[in-house]
Image (cartoon, rainbow, N blue to C red):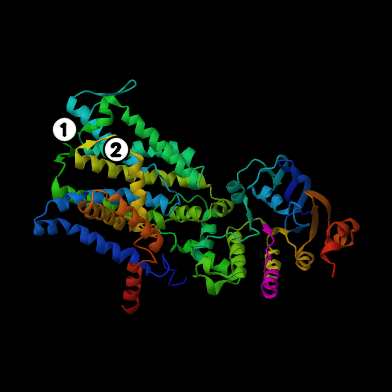
Amino acid sequence: MPKDLPAFIPGIDRRFAGIALPVIVMAALALLPWLAVRLDDPFLVRLFTRIVIFAIAAVALNFVLGFGGLASLFHASFMGIGGYVVGVLAHHDANETPLMLGPLAISGTSDLLITIPLAMVCCVLLAFITGLVCLRTSGIYFIMITLAFNQMIFYYFVALERYGGEDGLQILSPLHFGPFAAPKGAAFYYVCWGALCASLLLLRQIISSRFGIVLRAISQNERRAIALGVPALRYKIAAFAISAAVTSIAGALLATNQKFVSPADLSWIRSADLVIIVVLGGISLVWGPVIGAIAFFLAELLLSSWTIHWQLPFGILVILVGIFLKEGIISSGSPAAAWTRRRTRHG
Amino acid sequence: MASTMLNVVGLTKRFGGLIVSEDIHLEIAAGETHAVIGPNGAGKTTLINQIQGELRADSGRIIFRGQDISRASAPHRARLGIARTYQVTSIFPEFSVITNVALARQVAAGHSFRFFRAAESDRSLTEPALETIARVGLADRASALARDLSHGERRQLELAMALAGGPRLILLDEPMAGMGGQDSARMKRLLAEIKKFCTILLVEHDMDAVFALADRVTVLVGGRNVATGSPDQIRADQGVRDAYLGHASEP
């Protein structure tokens, strides 16, 4: 058995890029509430709560995009539905009316320990059903079909007058985790941070497992994988469902955080934002999108404080990253990688 | 009498108006190395694609070890023991040589719905993979990325991937295409080794290799089987000489 398997990304030391760097980044994120107190800037915690939540969704998207080669524009729906499951059940809880699903009467609840797993189940089912259709295609067709599915879900919720339609749905009842009230501020930030850590560890493990090897193989050369005996569709559906489940957690946390869900949470623009976050950060590492999320929201914040047309310079920034870094900020071609290469060579 | 590994009965395939396989009959005995030769466009690769399952035949049957697999999916056929290589090498460029081969082994070993244990350090996969890699002569390149291999090395890797699953029948689509003298001599030696324990369907333009390796030869011209016989019979067949060999052996 050769000792040194090839680097995960050529040029970057595998351990440094795959273990040390993400630990440093996650540790820095853990220190953020402390920094916010020191700077007396509570806005920082609010901003980074959002960043961490979107990082969860982007990491989940990258699981199928970076490792499965599936550029899905459907992920806003998984996020949005995650939020709506929390919102709708909390709505019925607040009104003390049951949710009628045909002959089934489900009583509302504000317990996130029930609604988050339920959100995951809903998104897994949706991913499974839609995956049966869209995962038979690839490339541009896959992108178009996932976009179409996303629009279907979007307009469904726009037309859903019972839950606020286009105006969205306020979450009025107090959400709680079992016996504990859902925390606010820094404590809620740590809940999200923990969920991000768990997502990273889980997806990293899956990517290096037998399943993950097969998924990566399919994305590199599906024809070859099939000739070896891989029924590719099954693996892609499973990966899509795993990604959907993790994304729905991000959606549920976002709804909990803003006490509000609306169709804007599942518009295709949200899907595109997630793709941009993933591509900004780098698709070749599990945790690349964490950097992407930080870069995305900080750029939005800085540029929008500078001009109301902030999307314009932001677009240019994304284009520049696309041209010069190709695989994102955390990639073999980036200055960050060159820096880590120097570090690991001398260190 | 040796048992039949593969029996192709009346295989026909059309692409629109173009008939690429026309009523092909082919019988390959277990342990046999059966070469399929013919000019470009004769339908040799199309035949391999239909046996492997990438293409469905319009009519006719494919019987593998007594089982009709005409309607079976390509992955199913692979798991029954049909492996192949491609005319243009087809590998996983971002994986190392060892991961390419270990993956082939993993797929043959059963489903891969295993989500937690790391696969790349799984000795039950890497050890047999290294053995196979050594067998095709790539031992010193085991940890190289597949995309960094030379053309000849990629061919060796693809062969290792085909062998890793322990196939019963290997379909080789021009394994020597584009190879220099040294590489192709090595490949010929390698195939002579593999021939001892595996049934082979060999599509190849290198006539020296074909006549050295094959137990029997089938000649395809324009999608039709014009002759099948021992290498000597084929060499002597006037129709074959006219259709194909005459041109190939012109000085």
Residue at image location 80% in from the left, 58% down from the top: B217
Vertical comparison of A63 with A330: above or below: above
Front residue (pair A14, B1) = A14
In the picture as drawn, the residue positioned furthest to the top comes out as A103
**Do the CB atoms of the residues marked 1 and 2 lie less than 8 Å apart?**
no
Q: Amino acid at mark 2?
A: Ala
| Parent chain of label 1 | A
Measure the C-alpha gap from mark 1 to mark 2.
22 Å
Vertical comparison of A254 with A10: above or below: above
- Magenta segment, which residues? B171-188
Look at the image and say whether residue B180 sits in the magenta stretch: yes
Residue at image location 70% in from the left, 53% down from the top: B45
Residue A326 seen anywhere in this rendered image of the structure: no
Q: Position of residue A37 (x, y in %)?
A: 9, 56
Assign a secondary structure to mark 2. Answer: helix
Q: Which mark is residue A264?
A: 2
Residue B148 seen anywhere in this rendered image of the structure: yes
Mark 2 burial class by Cα count in 10 Å: few <14, some 14-19, many 20+: some
Q: Is residue A319 left or right of residue B84?
A: left
Q: Is residue A182 left or right of residue A287?
A: left
- Residue under circle 1? A173
Assign a secondary structure to mark 1. Answer: loop
Q: Amino acid at mark 1?
A: Ser
In the picture as drawn, the residue positioned furthest to the bottom comes out as A346
Look at the image and say whether residue B80 sits in the magenta stretch: no
Q: Position of residue B213 (x, y in %)?
A: 76, 65
Front residue (pair A106, A324) = A324
Q: Position of residue A208 (x, y in %)?
A: 41, 58
